[in-house]
Image (tube, helix red, strand yellow):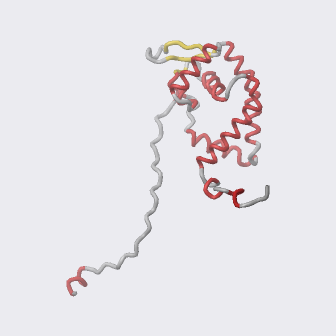
């Protein structure tokens, strides 16, 4: 197909859109994850849950929501499925009878250990898309943007929301104001 106007359709808008670019990068990252980890039977979000629980044994499901970024109802369904698979066990929290705490089972620990090298390879492939000098900064920016609460037991209050900048109104040409003395004289 010959290059034409359609080849750059929307490029100006999309190449400067953070939401679009993040979506594209996410798609790429999930494709790489699937290539590296697809046969392990653990999805990227399941890995996130296993890793977060391993780092915070006995963590509550509420804290897992903060640590993983997975919404409450989806996480509850995932935990239930992971309990059925034998990867997690759940019990009432000793600190709060209304909350459930989650722990890895031996099978969950084995699944996590089996997939870690595959996830490390996927992460290495993703970072290899950047110059080595940009990798640490990239991870720092992603962590800042995600508001990563990787240690929910030590969670701090959430930061205040930042309002989007208001669009500037076009400035009107204003007539110079006369001072009071000039007005009285007129």
Q: Position of residue 160 (x, y in %)?
A: 45, 42
Q: Is residue 14 above or below residue 42?
A: below
State the residue at coordinates (60%, 22%). Answer: 53
Q: Is residue 110 above or below residue 49?
A: above
State the residue lying farthest toward the left: 184
Q: Is residue 94 above or below residue 67?
A: above
Q: How many marks?
A: 0
State the residue at coordinates (50%, 25%). Answer: 62
Q: Position of residue 124 (x, y in %)?
A: 76, 37
Query: In which quadrant is the N terminus drawn?
Result: bottom right
State the residue at coordinates (66%, 40%). Answer: 26
State the residue lying farthest toward the right: 1
Picture quadrant of residue 56: top right
Going by the image, does 9 lie left or right of 167?
right
Query: In which quadrant is the C terminus drawn?
Result: bottom left
Q: For this rendering, which residue is in front, 162 or 9?
A: 9
State the residue at coordinates (55%, 25%). Answer: 75
Picture quadrant of residue 16: bottom right
Going by the image, does 149 lie left or right of 36?
left
Q: Position of residue 157 (x, y in %)?
A: 46, 35
Q: For this rendering, which residue is in front, 97 or 175?
A: 175
Q: Position of residue 69 (x, y in %)?
A: 56, 32
State the residue lying farthest toward the bottom: 185
Picture quadrant of residue 139: top right
Q: For this rendering, which residue is in front, 59 or 2?
A: 2
Going by the image, does 36 lie left or right of 154?
right
């Amino acid at each position: 197909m010959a290059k034409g106007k359609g080849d750059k359709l929307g490029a100006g808008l999309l190449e400067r859109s953070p939401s679009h670019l993040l979506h594209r990068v996410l798609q790429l990252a999930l494709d790489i994850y699937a290539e590296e980890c697809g046969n392990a039977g653990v999805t990227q979000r399941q890995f996130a849950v296993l890793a977060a629980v391993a780092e915070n044994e006995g963590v509550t499901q509420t804290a897992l929501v903060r640590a993983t970024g997975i919404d409450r109802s989806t996480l509850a369904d995932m935990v239930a499925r992971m309990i059925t698979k034998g990867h997690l066990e759940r019990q009432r929290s000793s600190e709060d009878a209304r909350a459930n705490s989650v722990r890895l089972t031996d099978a969950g620990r084995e699944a996590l250990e089996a997939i870690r090298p595959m996830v490390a390879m996927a992460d290495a492939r993703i970072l290899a898309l950047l110059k080595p000098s940009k990798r640490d900064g990239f991870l720092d920016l992603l962590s800042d943007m995600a508001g990563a609460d990787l240690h929910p037991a030590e969670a701090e209050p959430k930061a205040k929301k930042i309002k989007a900048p208001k669009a500037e109104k076009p400035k009107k040409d204003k007539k110079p104001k006369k001072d009071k003395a000039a007005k009285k004289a007129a």
